Amino acid sequence: MTVAEVLLQELSLWGVERIYGVAGDAVLGFLDAVSKQAQVRFIPVKHEFHAGIMASAEAKLTGKVGVCFATMGPGFMNLLNGLADAHLDRTPVVAITGQAPVKQIGGDENQVIDQQVAIQPIARYSSLIVHPDAAVDRMYKALHLARTHGVVTHLSVPSDLFEQSQAQPLRPPVPWIHGQVAFSRDLLEPVLGVMRSCRRPMIVAGEGAWSARPDLPRLAQQWGGGLVTTLGGKGIVDEGFPFHVGGLGEGGSPEVPWLLQESDLILLIGTTYWPEGFVPRQPRVVQVDAAPENLGQRVQVEYGIVADAGAVVALLADALSDHRPDQEWIDRVQAAHRQWKETVERESEFDGNPLPPQRVMGALSAHIPPDAIITVDTGDHTVWFNRNFRSRGQTLLYSGDWRTMGFGLPAALAAKLSQPHRPVVAVVGDGGLAMGLGELTTAVQEGTPITVVLMNNDSLQMEKSKMIMRGYGQAGVDLTNPDFVKVAEASGWRAERVRDATQLESALVESLADPKPTLLDIPVQGVVPPLTGQKPLGSS
């Protein structure tokens, strides 16, 4: 087999079904091999950034390794933004990039750059293959590290190597036998002692707490703790649960920072999110996380527990079954819950033309089915989604620590390709969508009937809001947008401009049943979110 053929067969052995990328001179030999096999499907996209995002989104959704590729030079550099999303969110992705012919590497030829140096901050492992017989071992290592450590890995392949023959046999993945790790209650006694002694407990749950979903409400109730969720933990408990007091950060409840300030112990589960201005400066914290490197990453902790959240939360809940929580604190927590619930319900009925973003989120809450996948782009709409969307258990995909604009549309395409039986909705802003309009045609090309909800306020509203709150002059935040409906229709989509709440609700229902991809362009008010510019707790 050639190097290109063996790379593809190795990917197939590891269960890779799709690779995302853009054609280029340095990968023509690879594409030749792609065209002659059917095991690994090639998804040609319009920009390498989106190829990286799609590989990252697929890996986040499925837990499997996502794969993307690009040509050398500009193609390689474009890919890095998408790979950074996977890197910071600890997502397993393998990137394959073409490189100059062997004799030109290190020279002054066009598009030649030291890829291993350029990708060093992002990839745990990066290798330049300089001999055909090294291809199998290098690909095996890249796949193995990505899969076992949840990291980005990278292979550079000189363009003249793809078509050369190699003699090494394929290396399938090692079959995994997952044993049960016993986590003894005795190990938790020091933590339980601290938990029993406190009277004003709080729990902050993030993406890593989903395995604890069955027991998290029980723990909150028996310990008497208010439950806060980050964006990644949205939907982990029913938001009608009387101990749930809202989200954390600009899109959260205004009561949450004060509850955390008053608390005498915070249990941080499956998250490192600790936004300045919304959290106390010197709290008592116990942290639970499966990744030891996350412990104490952003806040000093009294105890760090390295374990799956599900096992720990169940043990803590059992151990606290006879605990007598402080009724006065419970009353305080439940009053905060009622106040936040009433606020969100009231805001979901706001009306106007253009529509308030709160009303849009209320409609999305009511009509996006529980089995849907929602991809949330980065922007002002992210704050309103976190604040006003009432989750019913939908799967959320978003750019966590990298927070790149332009994530929503390509992530939705990857989600639909990976799990075509589920409804997929992308919630995007006009700034983010404008970065990736070319992928509208990718949706038609690949037959992915997704719904894009466009929150269109003709601005980079998140930045504009912060400028307003800080008294800055405004520059570069007002956008000159195309007619997104016409652009979508020209790309083969069904598209509709939505101007009132009644039309919005019917349009959502119709779009989710439509066999074509649908864009709902919703003009929305440029409203400054209430917690934008939050001052540090205790400041005047």
Image (cartoon, rainbow, N blue to C red):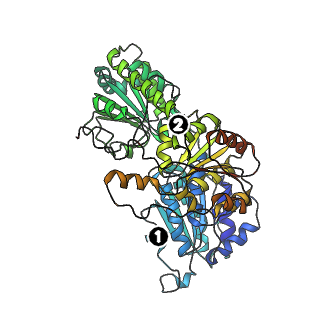
Q: Which mark is residue 350?
A: 2
Q: On screen, 370 above or below 314? A: below
Position of residue 476 measured from the top left corner of the image (x, y, whole percent): 43, 64
Residue 272, image quadrant: top left
Q: Which mark is residue 116?
A: 1
Label 2 secondary element = loop
* Residues marked 2 and 1 touching at CB (< 8 Å): no
Label 1 secondary element = helix
Position of residue 377 measured from the top left corner of the image (x, y, whole percent): 53, 51
Query: Callout 2: few (<14), some (14-19), or many (20+) C-alpha neighbours within 10 Å?
Result: some
Q: Residue at x 64, y 73 (%)?
A: 27
Q: In the rendered image, which quarter contains the N terminus?
A: bottom right
Q: Nearer the viewer, residue 251 or 489?
A: 489
Q: Nearer the viewer, residue 406 or 465?
A: 465
Position of residue 213 measured from the top left corner of the image (x, y, whole percent): 52, 30
Q: In the rendered image, which quarter contains the C terminus?
A: top left
Q: On screen, 191 above or below 24? A: above
Q: Nearer the viewer, residue 538 or 73?
A: 538
Residue type, label 1: Gln
Residue type, label 2: Phe
Query: Callout 1: few (<14), some (14-19), or many (20+) C-alpha neighbours within 10 Å?
Result: some
Relative to residue 283, is residue 229 drawn left or right?
Answer: right
Relative to residue 90, is residue 535 drawn left or right?
Answer: left
Residue 368, image quadrant: top right
Any part of residue 183 in sight: no
Residue 228, image quadrant: top left
